[in-house]
Amino acid sequence: MRCPYCRHADSRVVDSREADDGQLIRRRRACPECGKRFTTVEEAVLAVVKRSGVTEPFSRTKIMSGVRKACQGRPVDEDAIALLAQRVEESVRAKGAAEVPSHEVGLTILTPLRELDQVAYLRFASVYKSFDSLAEFEREIAELRAARDETAAEDDEPDPPGGPARDAGGRHTVAHRTTGRPPRITEPTGRS
């Protein structure tokens, strides 16, 4: 690494630390020529190739912006959007490619967005899957309903044949029947 002060062609690493959850490495360096110290930051760059062929750095902020638009008017908080963007970035980086097509990034957003909010998912999917007709919306809605019904069927399965249900600690769980009436609450009168 060239010294920014004297332009000497070499420098020595004095200290290294991870930053930004391991995404960056900060290195403190010393120049053997002039003796001055300086800091460098190393980051593994992930590039996104747009449809036009232009390449730009991957941006978690852009993902959050797109998801935020799809979630407009929906009961989705900012923390959930940030977590979704983090999951997408981890998935894209896990593929190990230095460059990823923007369309692939959009498709990677779909699965966690589907879990987060189905209406926002449909809005986003209509763009990234290039819906051209009502039939495509209807097919996607049918798939969402089928997945919901499958999940509901799994939740309604009876107790296993080995006996009643147990919680994580191995204790028996008991279902309480409700009568439909609100519980009676008695308040202390303050008299002894």
Image (cartoon, rainbow, N blue to C red):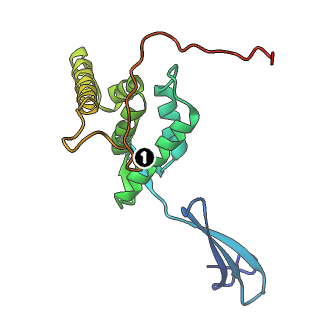
| Residue 107 falls in image quadrant | top left
Furthest toward the top, the residue is 181
Res. 55 in view: no
Reply above or below: 89 against 15: above
Residue where numbered disc 1 is placed: 88
Q: Nearer the viewer, residue 83 or 93?
A: 83
Q: Secondary structure at mark 1?
A: helix
Q: Position of residue 128 (x, y in %)?
A: 34, 32
Tally of numbered tags: 1
Image quarter in which the C terminus is found: top right
In front of the other: 30 or 81: 81
For label 1, count other residues whose C-alpha is less than 10 Å away and answer few (under 14), some (14-19) or many (20+): many
Q: Is residue 162 above or below residue 138?
A: below
The N terminus appears in which quarter of the rendering?
Answer: bottom right
What x and y, as percent, mark residue 8?
A: 68, 84
Q: Residue at x 34, y 57 (%)?
A: 95
Q: Residue at x 41, y 57 (%)?
A: 93
Q: Residue furthest right?
A: 191
Residue shown at 57% from the left, 38% from the top: 79
Give the residue furthest to the bottom.
32
Residue toward you, 127 or 185: 185
Mark 1: amino acid: Val
Report x, y in % for residue 44. Answer: 49, 64
Instruction: Mark yes or no: residue 131 visible.
Output: yes
